[in-house]
Image (tube, helix red, strand yellow):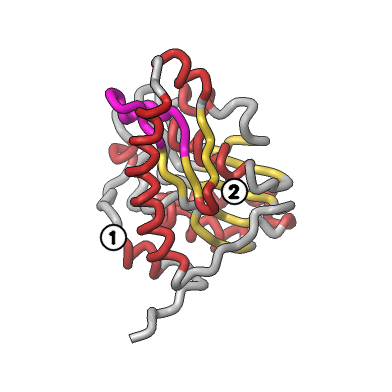
Amino acid sequence: MIYPDRWAAGHTLGQSLLHLRASNPLVLGLPRGGVPVAAAVRQVVGGDLDVLLVRKLGVPWQPELAMGAIGEGGVRVLNDDVVRRSGIRGDQIESVEAAERAELSRRERLVRERVPRVSLQDRTVVVVDDGMATGATAAVACRVALTHRPRWITMAVPVAAPEALDRLRGLVRETVCPYLPRSLGGVGGAYHDFHQLGDEEMLDLLPTSAPPDR
């Protein structure tokens, strides 16, 4: 299966999420590539649309391995098993967090001046990305979402490696993925159009966004 683009993938994914329509879900896209998928999902299932602003805290010598994540409102989650196995010192965690906190603050200023935050508390939340190769980013994003006390969390992606879904077991109430290839070389391989979104393209997809004051 090859999706034409993220929007088409979101519509396909939305058909697998129709059981959540009656719950008035809050669909949260992971910036940036998850946002067009989330926007299309929301078009199918209804509810509200927002972004989940998080930054992965990567192990300094293996950045793709998540030792934790930070989110809006000062939220920080650590994967204690990764920290313990990697032997990461406290000062190394603080150094990585400082750099990621600066980028998170930049994105938060950019987004929240135009898109009001929607509360996750007591909501049925659908966290959406454009795919999962390892599941590390999705896992830490869901951990951050859990700190806001939603009623239910579904992690939904158009494509994933089977082992990525295993990483989320016990962390969310359900995972939904229409396409599980035996071998996923990279998420982009499941799309004809997998261009990198800019900030403005992402913001234009959010229904609550308004042009900034000139």
Q: How crowded is mark 1: few (under 14 residues within 10 Å), some or many (20 or more)?
A: few
Asked if 125 appears above or below 134 in the picture, the reply is: below
Place of residue 104 in the rendered image (x, y in percent of width and height, measured from the top left): 40, 52
**Whether residue 134 can be seen here:** no
| Residue at figure coordinates x 47%, y 42% from the top left | 70
| Residue at figure coordinates x 47%, y 22% from the top left | 163
Place of residue 5 in the rendered image (x, y in percent of width and height, measured from the top left): 34, 52
| Residue at figure coordinates x 39%, y 35% from the top left | 94
Magenta residues, start to end: 57-69
Q: Is mark 1 on a helix, strand or loop?
A: loop
Front position in the image: 176 or 121: 121
Q: Badge 1 is on which residue?
A: 198
Q: Is mark 2 on a helix, strand or loop?
A: strand
Q: Quadrant of the N terminus?
A: top left
Q: Badge 2 is on which residue?
A: 126
Place of residue 77 in the rendered image (x, y in percent of width and height, measured from the top left): 53, 35
Quadrant position of residue 153? top right
